[in-house]
Amino acid sequence: MEAERPSTFEFHRSKGQHILKNPLIVASIVDKAAIRSTDIVLEVGPGTGNLTLAMLPKAKKVICIEIDPRMVAELTKRVRNSPYFSKFEVLCADALRTELPFFDICVSNTPYQISSPLVFKLLSHRPLFRCAVLMFQREFAMRLVARPNSEQYCRLSVNTQLLARVDHLLKVSKSNFTPPPKVESSVVRIEPRNPVPDINFTEWDGFVRLCFQRKNKTLRAIMKKKAVVELLERNYRTVREAQGGEMVMDFKEMLLEVLGKEAMGELRAVKMDQDDFLRCLSVFLEACIHFT
């Protein structure tokens, strides 16, 4: 006798994905998203559709993006048997490689392996959405919401908080999933800043990346390193040449002089807030010191 084929649900489990099974947690996530009857909701990685079915009665439309065609088939079958099929759309695609449709809110039990790129893809999406309520691995979520002087404070914290307000909503125990993951989870709310900060994000990210190479060191200690001085000097001379401007003879001396302004050289990334980073970057760019 031929062995029974595993269901799509078992295929999904075998790929290491974890289904949120607790209806109270599902209801809490949907409640915190504050979905309006006029909202188009985007869901990334819907799995078997527990969140999807909870959102459909509240939203104008729910658009799901699911990479696994077996999950797409199971989810479609499940929603077809509900009264909300006309409000449902599913795209079988990789969310990171797909142009996202228009949406008002994103709600997702996010596949952990795409957490960081998904956050920044959402924040670069235009037009701006109202908010995203996303579940992440606890450690990643704590880095998103971390503040200066905390152990979790890092480049991810600074970059995300430049573009959005991020709040921790609730902790989710691994016992709420099938199968249980090895880590705990948390749900966060991400609300894009509107208007978008008027800043060259490439320059910003280059500066922040450099600062967090040694986040407990002073900016002076970081930027006195030979490799850093050489990199910044190359950038400086490239830009000045393109501008047709005069160049200083001793770049390192100029760099140290700039670091002395407003005691910037004594700052440490681990203690710097958004205003500190913005102020420092502005001073550097004014001196034609670039980070890309």
Image (cartoon, rainbow, N blue to C red):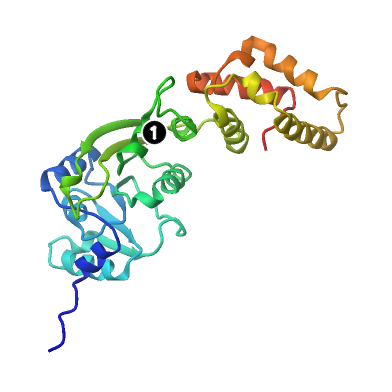
Q: Residue 244: give x, y in percent of width and height.
A: 87, 33
Q: Nearer the viewer, residue 145 or 2?
A: 2
Q: Residue 130: give x, y in percent of width and height.
A: 35, 39
**Residue type, numbered disc 1:** Arg
Residue 273 appears in view:
no
Residue 126 as seen in the image, left or right of residue 281: left
From the viewer's perspective, is residue 122 above or below residue 145?
A: below
Could you say which quadrant of the image residue 202 lies in?
top right
Residue 225 as seen in the image, left or right of residue 242: left
Which quarter of the figure is the C terminus placed in?
top right
Q: Nearer the viewer, residue 259 or 230?
A: 230
From the viewer's perspective, is residue 94 above or below residue 168?
A: below
Q: Residue at x 29, y 31 (%)?
A: 168
Q: Nearer the viewer, residue 45 or 218?
A: 218
Residue lying farthest to the bottom in this orientation = 1
| Classed neighbour count for the residue bearing mark 1: other residues with Cα under 10 Å, few (<14), some (14–19), many (≥20) | some
Per the image, the residue denoted by label 1 is 143
Q: Residue at x 55, y 23 (%)?
A: 277
Residue 94 as seen in the image, left or right of residue 225: left
From the viewer's perspective, is residue 184 above or below residue 56?
A: above
Could you say which quadrant of the image residue 221 lies in?
top right
Q: Residue at x 65, y 19 (%)?
A: 220
Residue lying farthest to the top in this orientation = 262
Q: How many marks?
A: 1
- Element on which disc 1 rests: helix
Q: Nearer the viewer, residue 113 or 70?
A: 113
Q: Residue 290: give x, y in percent of width and height.
A: 70, 31
Could you say which quadrant of the image residue 52 lies in?
bottom left
Residue 127 appears in view:
yes
Which quarter of the figure is the N terminus placed in?
bottom left
Q: Residue 206: give x, y in percent of width and height.
A: 61, 35
